[in-house]
Amino acid sequence: MASPGAKLGLQTIGSEQERAVAVVETEKQGDVAVIRMNNPPVNALGHALRTGLEAAFADANADPAVQAIVLTGTGRFFSAGADITEFASGMKEPFLPQVIDTIEASTKPVVAAVNGTALGGGLELALGCHYRVAAKDVRQLGLPEIKLGIIPGAGGTQRLPRAIGVEKALDLILSGAFIDAKAGAAAGLIDKIAEGDVVAEAVAFAKAHTAKPPRRIGQQTIDAAKVPAGLFEKARASIARHPSGPLAPKCAIDAVELSLTLPVSEGIPRERQIFREAAASPYARALQYAFFAERQAANLPGIGADVKTRAVETVGIIGGGTMGTGITLAFLNAGIPVTLVETTQDALDGGVNRIKDTLSANARRGRITEAQAADRLAKLTPALELKDLGKADLIIEAVFENMALKKEIFAKLDGIARSGAIIATNTSTLDVDEIAAVTKRPQDVLGLHFFSPANIMRLLEIVRAAKTGNDVMATAMGLAKRIGKVGVQAGVCDGFVGNRMLAAYAEEVQAMLLEGATPTDVDGALETWGMAMGPLAVADLAGLDVSYRIRKERKLVGERAQLARVPDKIVEMGRLGQKTGAGFYKYDANRKRQRDPEIEALIRAEGNAQQVRQKAISADEVVERSLLRLANEGAKILAEGIALRASDTDTMYLNGYGFPAWRGGPMWQADHLGLAKVAERIKAYHAQYGERWKIAPLIEKLAADGGSFAALDKKKR
Ligand code: CAA
């Protein structure tokens, strides 16, 4: 235990002297100095913390009364790594690798008491310590730098292979995955798991090691003979479509490979060079933008921490189709009990079976244990009556897109739901205000638009209707995080944010087909550019009948009807996409797509019938036209206040529409092309194609003022 008055003092440092909070605190527990990082919220290793650590270690090493040193964090965090905000503004000395070298060089044993999350530079810091004792409930140990488009830059690529073996280290660094304390111990990363107080156990561990020479990972060598043959070649062959883009994965492999041949003293400077190369890339900037954009989306203007959220402990879901069962799974997976309602026993059984099958498949594939699958299923209550939802804290309607049906359900729910329950519709297009208006409690109503498959896709579009209460919005945002989703606010309009932009993009794709591109040309160009799937392959996956039905309800006329003719004809041929084995493509038994000459002929015939001038469309043109339509519609949505920020629309595209994170999103892409250039290109297309290319006034204005979407977002903060 700490003896009263044994503090060595607070390290308030240099230019951060004025900072009210001391970020590094040293406390003496007998002859052990316990150095504690305290830099909320996540102990990011910013300049003040690095400077404080250097000073604290110098003091502890110089103090003859100190025999050993324990390094720990505060709250849930040991350290979440480098302060990402410093990447853009530039880092000042001491750099983290220097600090870690100082720690590793300590002549007294240094034990990391890993009290919580240790990621990136945080884990590298722990690897610089001579030993690691971790609290048993630590879940987040890893080097996730790759997700930010960079590589570990403080020795991680050199020390982790020495600590846990090259193959495992390469896997962790390339995937950016987190492991827990138990897996860390099994891998050799953690020396001891603390069952009780981690600092007390680390102090005891340190005391037991004072007589032994410090164990420095940086002085160990790797036995290259133990590295599996062909490991690096295989890794290089596996990264063609890595979610972090083309550069960081290659850099990570190169850096880890160096650990086989170079001593750490030479490996770390080389790692730093490679780190800088990755960090300077547009992909790293885009991924870091995406990281902060996602967190920014959770901030709802005018809704502060003082707004009391509602408790959501039980959920009712109406509709056992694909969407309803996906949403049910999303809640069950988060441990939240669900009552699922269908109108007939057959439909209910179908939904329940789908849920059971998914849970069993997840258990079979080792994603969850059998016990977890059983536990989740036990939290499901099937029901045939809406009145069984009377106690639910949140009710989500997930029946098919029909306004009359939705209104009928909401009117009934108004008489059934308990007072204070939140009532949501999963509509992807319909007017949430109109739905809310049939209840006497529009303040409790909102849209919760999940994306299919709802148990997998991370995006949750939270549609705020005119009268939705602040507490309901805050609750929905918190709930999104609880069920592992990225919540983003949207306002009410046809298609909200994501699907309204998608409609513009899909329309342009049809135009390109009529002009001479084949489905393979379009999807191939966009997939090569980085999209997870091309738009026509996505349409086949989602089912062509869904958008067909929506188009028929909308009774399209003019150019919009002409551009819908090909997909309409395909549906009318009975080709509904993957589920019928054919759509824009044909599919083999393994659902592998193949080009279909019949559809290509149909498209050509339609182009000719509409007298569309045929031309060759390059991959660059496919990408440009797709991106510009997305950004132009995004700008209109932003100007109308339907989206709060340009970065919110990007967050939606990255999490719900397969847009590659290393490309930042459509609005980010427009900014990086430069809005003046964007305006010029849109106007050129407008002159060529007419009204569907009408420029968003916001783009024109920003282009004229030399502005950008990012600068506009910043002004709103
Ligand atoms: N730097 C700066 N700010 C960070 C940060 C970091 N490394 N990690 C988190 N934050 C900020 C977030 O932006 C957020 O700020 P706001 O509240 O202002 O929005 C706040 O800390 C809390 O973060 P979350 O909302 O994400 O909290 P969470 O509990 O859901 O998740 C987390 C915590 C798992 C640590 C998550 O924040 C995360 O993944 N952070 C990034 C971790 C990472 O990538 N580390 C490597 C950094 S690069 C590096 O270390 C390079 C190197 O080799 C030296």
Image (tube, helix red, strand yellow):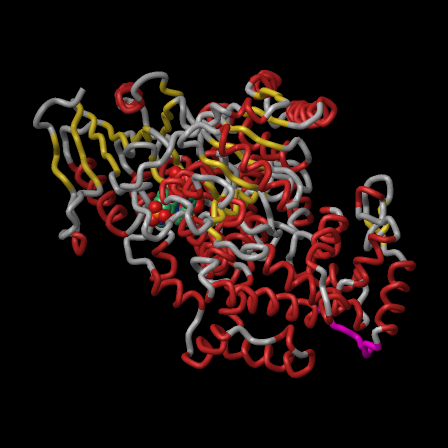
Quadrant the N terminus occupies: top left
Q: Is residue 687 left or right of residue 463?
A: right
Q: Is residue 612 magenta?
A: yes
Quadrant the C terminus occupies: bottom left
Q: Nearer the viewer, residue 620 or 433?
A: 433
Q: Nearer the viewer, residue 14 or 59?
A: 14
Residue 239 position, x and y percent, is 64, 49
Residue 601 position, x and y percent, is 90, 64
Q: Is residue 622 visible?
A: yes
Q: Residue at x 24, y 49 (%)?
A: 48
- Identify the image quadrant of residue 495: bottom right
Which residue lies most toward the left here? 5
- Identify the image quadrant of residue 353: top right
Q: Residue at x 59, y 50 (%)?
A: 430
Q: Is residue 109 left or right of residue 389?
A: left
Q: Is residue 121 visible?
A: no
Q: Is residue 258 magenta?
A: no
- Identify the image quadrant of residue 603: bottom right
Region of the chain picked out in magenta, as a range: 611-619
Residue 94 position, x and y percent, is 28, 53
Q: Residue at x 55, y 26 (%)?
A: 332
Q: Nearer the viewer, residue 74 or 48?
A: 74
Q: Residue at x 68, y 42 (%)?
A: 230
The image shows residue 290, relative to residue 422, as above or below, that is below
The image shows residue 193, relative to residue 284, as above or below, that is above
Residue 536 position, x and y percent, is 74, 56
